[in-house]
Amino acid sequence: MADTPPARPSPPSRLPQTFLAFDYGLKRTGVASGNRLLGHGTPLTTVTAEGDARFVKIAALIHEWQPDALVVGVPFHPDGAAHDNTRRAQRFARQLQGRFGLPVFSVDERYSTTEVLASGARDADAAAAALLLTQYLDEQERKEPR
């Protein structure tokens, strides 16, 4: 009987470590960056462009920050029902994935802008994106085994 080497364990799947997050809006889209190590988002900027011009600016941010994945806030009514902006944000998420080939995750963004406005944020859109990213990272932290 020939000796067989011990089976190697499967390498762990590589979890995304760095992120750009987006608080999508028709005219303004807040952008934040963050990573798993720090566990929170940091406001970057607000993109004030529409259509393809929006994606040109986003492409520059993706090139500069080199994220592993993207996070998009998706709004819902207080009761959880979808509305027009829900579908627009979901479409935006699909466009990001299609254009940039990065994993895109969504997070419920109910009340994010209200919360950052109440805190006195100067750039509410970028601050909302940071809040969304922090929320996403918190959710992932709770899901991961210790």
Image (tube, helix red, strand yellow):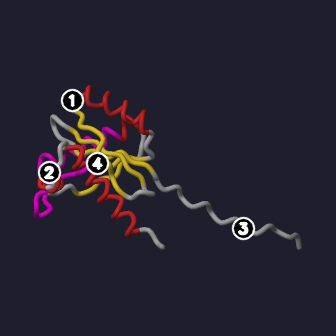
- Mark 4 vs 2, N-terminal side: 4
Mark 1 neighbour class, 10 Å CA radius: few under 14, some 14 to 19, many 20 or more: some
Residue that label 2 marks: 120
Which residue is depicted at the point 80% across and 67% down?
Answer: 5
What residue span does the magenta drawing correspond to? Answer: 72-96
- Amino acid type at image mark 2: Gly
**Gap between marks 4 and 2, in whole Å?**
22 Å
Residue that label 3 marks: 7
Helix, strand or loop at mark 1: loop
Q: Quadrant of residue 39?
A: bottom left
Q: Nearer the viewer, residue 13 or 142?
A: 142
Mark 2 neighbour class, 10 Å CA radius: few under 14, some 14 to 19, many 20 or more: few
Helix, strand or loop at mark 3: loop
Residue that label 4 marks: 72
- Amino acid type at image mark 4: Val
Mark nearest the camera among 2 and 1 is 2
